[in-house]
Image (cartoon, coloured by chain):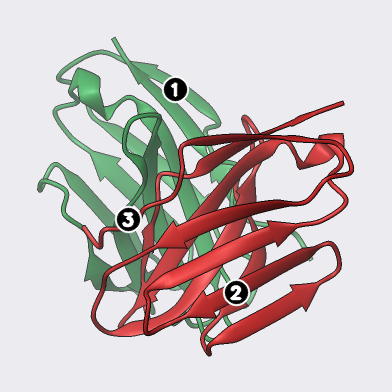
Chain colours: A red, B green
Amino acid sequence: GQNIDQPTEMTATEGAIVQINCTYQTSGFNGLFWYQQHAGEAPTFLSYNVLDGLEEKGRFSSFLSRSKGYSYLLLKELQMKDSASYLCAVLRNFNKFYFGSGTKLNVKP
Amino acid sequence: KAGVTQTPRYLIKTRGQQVTLSCSPISGHRSVSWYQQTPGQGLQFLFEYFSETQRNKGNFPGRFSGRQFSNSRSEMNVSTLELGDSALYLCASSLVGGGLNNEQFFGPGTRLTVL
């Protein structure tokens, strides 16, 4: 595989901020994607980073450091509906996606 | 614009049988990728088709095969089913693949149970 690692599970409180980390080792890197997947549903696209830095999209932000093989997804003002699995995926050689095992986020009241 | 559709949504088969799953991509999308998702292994790439040609292949045995038709619809076939093939099979479509400004849109998946 492409050695994509992310924590298995995290718990956070409604209204708080949570950071989900993803580390990877790959050649032919062409970008990193974050997907959200609610139980029993298909993954939905959240963000895409190809250059170093922070991409902000509403309550969600994603950061990439290519030299460190590191990304994180930052979720602010957590809501109960944010309880889901978050998948980190690396795009390699422009057309092959490798997914991490996902981080299950539990948001508690 | 209709999303990605997959049929059937649920399927139960026995060991040794074969199965065919279908995926209709979003209209205009030419790239279709297939993934297997299991609790233990996460989302694993099976193969990708573009313009009726398999462009990429993951590390799955030859029992897993696929094809794409001229209208971009795709099918995947699993022969000689094993218990370990029980999984959610997801199809994802994108305009031309490649990721850059071509995000993947996932279908609802087909839940395959092998008894």
SS label for mark 3:
strand
Tell me, yes or no, if residue B105 can be seen here.
no
Write the residue at 29% across / 60% down: B47
Residue labelled with disc 1:
B11
Question: Which quadrant does the N terminus of chain B fall into?
Answer: bottom right
Which one is in front in this view, the residue at disc 3 or the one at disc 1? 3
User: Marks 1/2: CA distance?
Assistant: 39 Å
Label 2: chain? A
Question: Which quadrant does the C terminus of chain B fall into?
Answer: top left
Write the residue at 48% across / 45% down: A102
Badge number at residue B45: 3
User: Marks 3/1: CA distance?
Assistant: 20 Å
The residue at the far top in this view is B115
Label 1: chain? B
In-image side of A34 versus A99 (left or right): right
Q: Earlier in the sequence, mark 3 or mark 1?
A: 1
Q: Establish whether labels 3 and 2 are both on one chain.
A: no
Q: Disc 2 marks which amino acid?
A: Phe
Residue labelled with disc 2:
A63
Write the residue at 21% across / 57% down: A1
Callouts 3 and 2 close, C-beta under 8 Å: no
Decide which of A27, B13 is in the foreground and name it.
Answer: A27
Q: Disc 1 marks which amino acid?
A: Leu
Report x, y in % for residue A8.
Answer: 46, 37
In-image side of B24 versus B40 (left or right): right
Report x, y in % for residue B55.
Answer: 27, 75
Quadrant hosting residue A35:
bottom right
